[in-house]
Image (tube, rainbow, N blue to C red):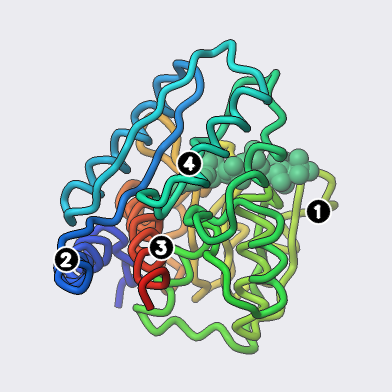
Amino acid sequence: MGALILDGKALAKAVEAQLKERVDSFKEKTGGSIPLLATILVGSDPASATYVKMKGNACARVGIESRRIEMPESTTTEELLEQIDVLNEDDQVFGILLQHPVPDQIDERAAFDRIAIEKDVDGVTCLGFGKMAMGEFAFGSATPAGIMTLLESYNIPIEGKHAVVVGRSPILGKPMAMMLLSKNATVTICHSKTKDLPSIVRTADIVVGAVGKPEFIKGEWIKEGAVVVDAGYHPGNVGDIDLKSVIDHCSAYTPVPGGVGPMTIATLITQTMLSAERRIA
Ligand code: NAP
């Protein structure tokens, strides 16, 4: 039997269908209010502009409003913080997405942490990370939270498994590791200073590639029957894992594209909806 494809595109579509119903019910309960996600794009990076557009389109598909704020490349940290303060104060706004990365002169961490916790639907604040790590409610970082939804939807066993996360970025590798730990996986986090990465990856029941380098993780590193999650996306439709050399001996994998990417967006809008529902609860 071939490897199971963890189809993020199909699951995201199903999630969107449910969200439409939740938006309708929210409108009914509030006499016509519509949840609103504010997106902030700083600078003119074309990839970032595309991601923001895709997120706005996904909102439109389910009936959530999006308000796009564009700021120039020369924006200072202070100016960005002021803009975030305005959105924090605005009762119409239920979620704030600051598209990453921001230009170099901006203190990205300060900007992320300025987002009010109840509007941090992309799960980027230190406070949200800490709460999530301690098992308290917080919106999870969208990409790893989307990966967890995908694994759970396919009933991939996590408890007691050895999960190896390659990458430790604040928005991906670190929260991914904490989420797997909270589901009782035994977790190893690898990074650029890790010694003999291939031999560690070979011990994994679940491998998450979050390295940011095209096809960096090789098929021969992957144990027979492992579950393979590729968070990477690079030109040429390749991820961080050399998937074509993995498919013949893994048990399940996320395709690129159509795996993790659609789940990231579906999670962002799900969490925006949840933020709205929590406000009226
Ligand atoms: P990042 O901030 O660049 O982090 C990359 C991580 O990989 C770092 O922790 C780094 O280690 C580690 N690394 C680099 N070279 C390594 C090596 N030779 N061996 C082992 N580890 C190494 O990237 P990111 O934002 O987490 O993104 C990772 C990937 O996910 C990218 O391909 C990105 O495009 C993708 N992504 C996808 C989505 C989506 O929605 N699908 C969202 C976000 C990101 P150090 O910490 O030691 O530097």
Q: Position of residue 273 (x, y in %)?
A: 33, 63
Front one among 221 and 186: 186
Mark 2 vs mark 3, foreground winner is 2
Mark 1 vs mark 3, foreground winner is 3
Which is more N-terminal, label 4 or label 2? 2
Q: Are there few (<14), some (14-19), or many (20+) residues within 10 Å of tag 2?
A: few
Q: Label 4, on which residue? A: 87
Which is more N-terminal, label 3 or label 1? 1
- Three-letter amino acid code of the residue under disc 2: Gly
Q: Are there few (<14), some (14-19), or many (20+) residues within 10 Å of tag 1?
A: few
- Three-letter amino acid code of the residue under disc 3: Gln
Q: Label 1, on which residue? A: 196
Q: Quadrant of the N terminus?
A: bottom left
Q: Label 3, on which residue? A: 271
Q: Quadrant of the C terminus?
A: bottom left
Q: Label 2, on which residue? A: 31
Query: What element does badge 4 sit on?
Result: helix
Q: Position of residue 146 (x, y in %)?
A: 43, 63
